[in-house]
Structure formats: C-alpha cells, structure tokens
C-alpha cells in the first residue's frame, strides 16, 4: 500500500464530506440553485476520486509501476483543478475559473486511462 496516496485520498474524502455538509447546510439559501448544483458537482467528483486515490494506494501494494503512480497523481490534480475551480466558481461567481475545470476533467480521464492500461 502506498501511504502517500492513502493519506491524500483520506484527506480528500474527509474534506469532501465536510464540504458536502457545508454545501447542504451552510450554502442553501445563500447560493442560487445553479451555483449550489455546481458546488454539489465539485463535491461529488471529489468524493469519487478520493476513493479512486485510495484504491490506487491499495493496488500499489500488490503491483508497482509508473502507470499506477501517474493515475494517483492525475486523480489528485483532477480534484484540485476540477473540483477546486468549481468551488471557487460557485462561491465567488468568477466565471474565468470555469476555464480551468476541463483541465481537471482531462486529469481525471488520464488517471482512469492509466488504470486501464496498468490492468493489462
């Protein structure tokens, strides 16, 4: 098991739960329904990929390789770029942060692609 990815995934999951609760209880009524949906999308993708990072950590305990490490770092970058840009967009309304979101989405795709190739 790779302890770095276990730590990153666990922290991302912890923050995802906290941000989800904040969004559900602290932001309802403060954000427009559209911006609340953006915030919820950020939380959802953060949680999916926090679990993917933990899974990558577990897989690294059984097999090693640059593809698995690339997957873990890609998922991490995706959370920061995709979810992070959506959090900023929802909370500030600054739409230029939306331009960063697709880069995070590509990082997620790269991570999943690396896992696919590593499986072979």
Image: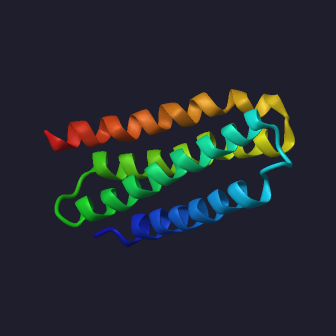
Side of 29 where 47 appears, left or right: left
The total number of labels drawn is: 0
Image x and y of residue 56, in percent: 32, 56
* Residue 11 vertical placement versus 119 (above, below): below
Residue 30 in the image, given as x and y percentages of width and height: 86, 48
Q: Residue at x 81, y 46 (%)?
A: 91
Q: Position of residue 72 (x, y in %)?
A: 40, 52
Q: Is residue 77 above or below residue 13?
A: above
Q: Residue at x 69, y 55 (%)?
A: 24
Please give left or right for residue 57 compared with residue 15 in the image. Answer: left
Q: Residue at x 58, y 31 (%)?
A: 103
Outermost residue, left side: 120
Assign the N terminus to one quadrant of the image.
Answer: bottom left
84 or 48: nearer the viewer? 48
44, above or below 11, in the image: above
Q: In the rendered view of the protein, which quadrant contains the C terminus?
A: top left
Q: Nearer the viewer, residue 20 or 106?
A: 20
Toward which corner of the image does residue 2 lie, by quadrant? bottom left
- In this rendering, position of residue 33 left or right of residue 57: right
The colour scheme applied to this rendered structure is rainbow
Task: Indicate the quadrant where residue 36 lies.
Answer: top right
Above or below, comparing residue 87 to residue 98 in the picture: below
Judging depth in this view, the residue of 77 and 22 nearest the camera is: 22
Q: Quadrant of residue 108?
A: top left
Q: Residue at x 30, y 50 (%)?
A: 68
User: Which percent across, then down, holds residue 57?
Assistant: 32, 63
């Amino acid at each position: 098991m790779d302890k770095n990815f276990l730590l990153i995934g666990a922290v991302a999951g912890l923050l995802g739960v906290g941000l989800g609760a904040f969004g559900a209880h602290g932001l309802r009524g403060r954000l427009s329904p559209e911006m609340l949906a953006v915030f919820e999308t950020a939380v959802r993708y953060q949680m999916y990929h926090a679990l993917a990072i933990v899974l990558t950590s577990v897989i690294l305990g059984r097999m090693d390789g640059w593809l698995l490490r690339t997957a873990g770092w890609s998922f991490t970058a995706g959370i920061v770029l995709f979810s992070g840009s959506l959090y900023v967009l929802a909370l500030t309304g600054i739409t230029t942060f939306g331009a960063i979101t697709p880069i995070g989405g590509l990082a997620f795709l790269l991570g999943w692609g690396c896992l696919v190739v590593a499986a072979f």
